[in-house]
Image: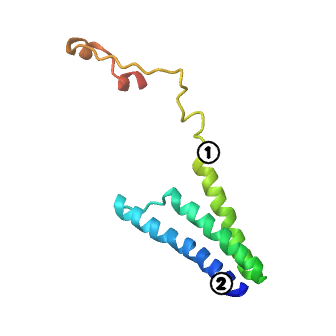
Amino acid sequence: MTAEQLWVGFGLLGQLLFTGRFLVQWLASERHGKSVIPISFWYLSLSGATVLMTYAIYRQDPVFIIGQSTGFLIYIRNLQLIRKPKSTSEQRPESETVITIKLPPSQEAAAPSSKSRAA
């Protein structure tokens, strides 16, 4: 097997990874009954783009390199956004405890409702 054949095999592996992301996305959407993008979609995208970018650099193909590098940045950013913790306004501090008190029926009627407090 020649070096060129190995590179073509490497490029095909990248294309297989990159194409596999659509299969993963389709199966996840079917399972949920709506269109979803699982995190594995982004990892397959990043893996495929890395292999294809390496292959494009070997081929010295500027069009291929630009196309893969743009996607590469987008996949990394999406993974960063997924891992980013929610804003502090959306998070409840671990020390904060919520206690729900159920009033007896006779006191429920006398207690002011949240609607009357908001008005």
Q: The disc labelled 2 sits on which kind of residue?
A: Val
**Quadrant housing the C terminus:** top left
Q: Total number of numbered labels?
A: 2
Residue 14, above or below 42: below
Residue most extreme to the front? 1
Q: Which residue is mark 1?
A: 84
Q: Position of residue 8 (x, y in %)?
A: 65, 84
Judge from the rendering whether residue 78 lies leftward or rightward of residue 113; answer left or right: right
Q: Position of residue 69 (x, y in %)?
A: 72, 70
- The residue that appears at 52% across and 63% down in the rendered structure is 41
Judge from the rendering whether residue 25 lies leftward or rightward of residue 52; answer left or right: left
- The residue that appears at 48% across and 58% down in the rendered structure is 38
Q: Nearer the viewer, mark 2 or mark 1?
A: 2
Q: Position of residue 104 (x, y in %)?
A: 23, 13
Q: Which residue is mark 2?
A: 8
Q: Which quadrant would residue 87 be assigned to in this image? A: top right
Q: The disc labelled 1 sits on which kind of residue?
A: Lys
The answer, for residue 119, to whether it is visible in the render is no
Residue most extreme to the left? 106
